[in-house]
């Protein structure tokens, strides 16, 4: 007999069955702004199709299933043979296949490839962020491989393929391939020059035998890996195939999978190399220089991934508060909640606008854009990824106790939110990279000033922030201890400049007041109440 003690009311419908891309006004505006008009219909149609897929109940369920059923390590088969394989839930493979077919590894030779991929990556992250790791590394491996034209000719068509082939077999027999990465070791962490994995040259030119241990190897089920090891000529980059051309397994001993806070659908492993066959990529002793473009690409993906997580958190919060009634009215209409939602929305839009601007710079390829990326990518990676955890936590609080329950999806976003700040160089590494760009590449700061200078005179708080930044940079005494402060200010001023130029006035006004003008508190929901906060919240509302 059905219970009759209460009726279910005032509950919020699930946010499903909508176009994740088209419902994001900040994202769609950024894509259209940077897109060649001749590509508009093609790209917007492509992204809207992915948005509808991402917002569907079926694909959202796949994301939940992949997260709830993490990968399992199988070191041996039933007969005792060493196999070193990782088993994934079928939903993981469905998601990864959708991501590959959506072009998330195919940016390098498509018109507006980086822009359209960046928007797609931001959308797809909102389904389940774990499968973004192999997609990101496969995408980012291309520029590293291009240092060796022969290797690039062999591998690039596989990596940029829009076909997902999950079978573990020789790469030349596959319609598409994925790449992973293994740089970190127990003793080194971010100091990759302290790596101890050794590379002994073999008889065939360019081939080596690797011996050593990698403490973090991302996506160990991939077809190939870029790793760093000490060759006779110094630290060098190598390509390690998972399966050799003759069909035999390369020596790739999976010792264990990491038990992680978030990103649980993705596997991260400890790997032993013991006579492992590898092909050199680039020259001996130039491993860091060879792999640096891969690192830059994955760092930009950290910005995009965090922007995607923030957008989904804000969308869920605004959606909930739009439907939930409290004290005689909609929760979103209550002045204090409206302030919280608007503050979160401003943070999300600033992250999205900056991320897409950097992606567009990758497509441009000009000298000034490359110089801008040199300083803007580490600054953005530092700041945007730092903002993701407090946004996710505050958004969960907007749902009250419901936001603390797994079924809401917010706990998964909260657990995922710190990852991008740690991966590909934590905060201090990014801040120090900003310093290196300032000190060694004056063209980088010149490009930055030209970019932010396009908004000069449009907002007095932005003008004052630019002036204060120049004053701070004029005094480089003890600058390393101020590196985080500088990275933060560089990112905030750049975000402010972009919003003043391109965002609706109410969004730019709120950002400049709270982030640049000092008229806001340390917590979200402390915007000046005199601003047009209702319009900011409405802009962030996902229309299902």
Image (tube, rainbow, N blue to C red):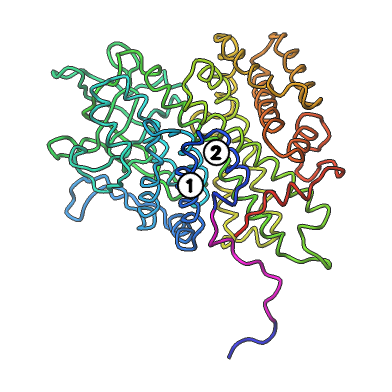
Taking the spot 81% from the left edge, 41% from the top edge, the residue there is 527
State whether the magenta stretch is mostly helix, strand or loop. loop
Neighbour class for label 2 at 10 Å: few (<14), some, many (≥20)?
many
Taking the spot 53% from the left edge, 22% from the top edge, the residue there is 373
In the structure shown, which secondary structural element does the residue marked by tag 1 occupy?
helix
Please state the extent of the stretch shown in magenta in the rendering: 7-19
Taking the spot 77% from the left edge, 29% from the top edge, the residue there is 516
- Which residue is nearer to you in this view: 502 or 399? 502
Compared with 63, 455 (above or below) is: above
- Which residue is nearer to you in this view: 463 or 438? 463
Label pair 2/1, CB-CB below 8 angstroms: yes
Of the image marks 2 and 1, the number of the one nearer the N terminus:
2
Compared with 355, 484 (above or below) is: above
* Image spot of residue 512 (x, y percent): 77, 32
| Residue 15 is inside the magenta segment | yes
Quick one: quadrant of the C terminus?
bottom right
Distance between the alpha carbons at the discs numbered 2 and 1: 10 Å
- Left or right of residue 131, residue 356 in this image: right
In the structure shown, which secondary structural element does the residue marked by tag 2 occupy?
helix
> Residue beneath label 2, please?
31
Compared with 471, 109 (above or below) is: below
User: Which disc, if any, is residue 47?
Assistant: 1
Task: Point out the residue furthest to the front here.
Answer: 38
* Image spot of residue 166 (x, y percent): 28, 48
* Image spot of residue 23 (x, y percent): 59, 52
| Residue 433 is inside the magenta segment | no
* Image spot of residue 329 (x, y percent): 81, 65
């Amino acid at each position: 007999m059905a219970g009759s003690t209460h009726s279910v009311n005032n509950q919020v419908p699930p946010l499903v069955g909508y176009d994740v891309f088209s419902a994001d006004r900040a994202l769609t505006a950024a894509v259209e702004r940077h897109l060649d008009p001749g590509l508009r219909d093609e790209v917007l149609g492509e992204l809207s199709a992915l948005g509808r897929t991402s917002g569907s109940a079926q694909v959202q369920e796949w994301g939940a299933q992949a997260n709830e059923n993490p990968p399992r390590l199988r070191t041996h088969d039933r007969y005792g043979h060493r196999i070193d394989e990782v088993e994934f839930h079928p939903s993981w493979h469905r998601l990864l296949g959708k991501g590959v077919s959506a072009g998330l590894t195919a940016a390098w030779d498509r018109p507006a490839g980086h822009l359209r991929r960046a928007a797609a990556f931001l959308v797809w992250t909102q389904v389940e962020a774990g499968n973004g790791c192999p997609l990101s590394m496969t995408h980012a491996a291309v520029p590293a491989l291009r240092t060796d034209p022969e290797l690039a000719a062999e591998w690039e068509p596989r990596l940029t393929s829009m076909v997902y082939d999950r079978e573990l077999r020789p790469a030349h027999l596959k319609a598409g391939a994925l790449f992973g990465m293994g740089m970190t070791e127990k003793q080194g962490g971010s100091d990759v020059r302290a790596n101890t994995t050794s590379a002994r040259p073999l008889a065939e030119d360019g081939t080596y035998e690797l011996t050593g241990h990698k403490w973090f190897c991302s996506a160990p089920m991939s077809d190939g890996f870029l790793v760093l090891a000490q060759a006779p000529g110094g630290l060098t980059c190598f390509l390690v195939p998972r399966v050799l051309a003759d069909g035999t397994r390369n020596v790739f001993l999976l010792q264990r999978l990491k038990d992680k806070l978030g990103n649980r659908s993705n596997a991260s492993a400890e790997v032993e190399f013991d006579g492992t066959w590898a092909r050199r990529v680039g020259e001996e002793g130039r491993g860091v220089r060879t792999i640096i473009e891969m690192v830059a690409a994955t760092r930009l993906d950290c910005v995009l991934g965090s922007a995607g997580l923030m957008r989904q958190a804000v969308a869920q919060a605004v959606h909930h508060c739009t439907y939930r009634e409290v004290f005689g009215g909609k929760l979103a209409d209550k002045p204090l909640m409206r302030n919280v939602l608007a503050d979160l929305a401003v943070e999300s839009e600033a992250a999205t606008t900056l991320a897409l601007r950097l992606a567009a710079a990758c497509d441009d390829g000009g000298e000034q854009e490359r110089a801008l990326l040199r300083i803007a990518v580490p600054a953005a990676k530092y700041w945007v990824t730092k903002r993701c955890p407090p946004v996710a936590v505050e958004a969960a609080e907007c749902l009250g106790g419901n936001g603390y329950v797994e079924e809401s999806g917010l706990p998964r976003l909260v657990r995922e939110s710190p990852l991008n700040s740690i991966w590909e160089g934590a905060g201090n590494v990014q801040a120090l990279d900003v310093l290196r760009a300032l000190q060694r590449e004056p063209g980088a700061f010149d490009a930055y000033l030209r970019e932010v200078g396009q908004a000069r005179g449009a907002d007095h708080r932005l003008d004052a922030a630019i002036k204060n930044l120049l004053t701070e940079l004029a005094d480089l005494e003890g600058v390393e201890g101020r590196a985080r402060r500088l990275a933060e200010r560089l990112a905030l001023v750049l975000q402010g400049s972009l919003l003043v130029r391109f965002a609706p006035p109410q969004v730019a006004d709120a950002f400049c007041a709270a982030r640049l003008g000092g008229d806001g508190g340390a917590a979200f929901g402390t915007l000046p109440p005199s601003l047009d906060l209702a319009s900011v919240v409405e802009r962030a509302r996902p229309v299902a």
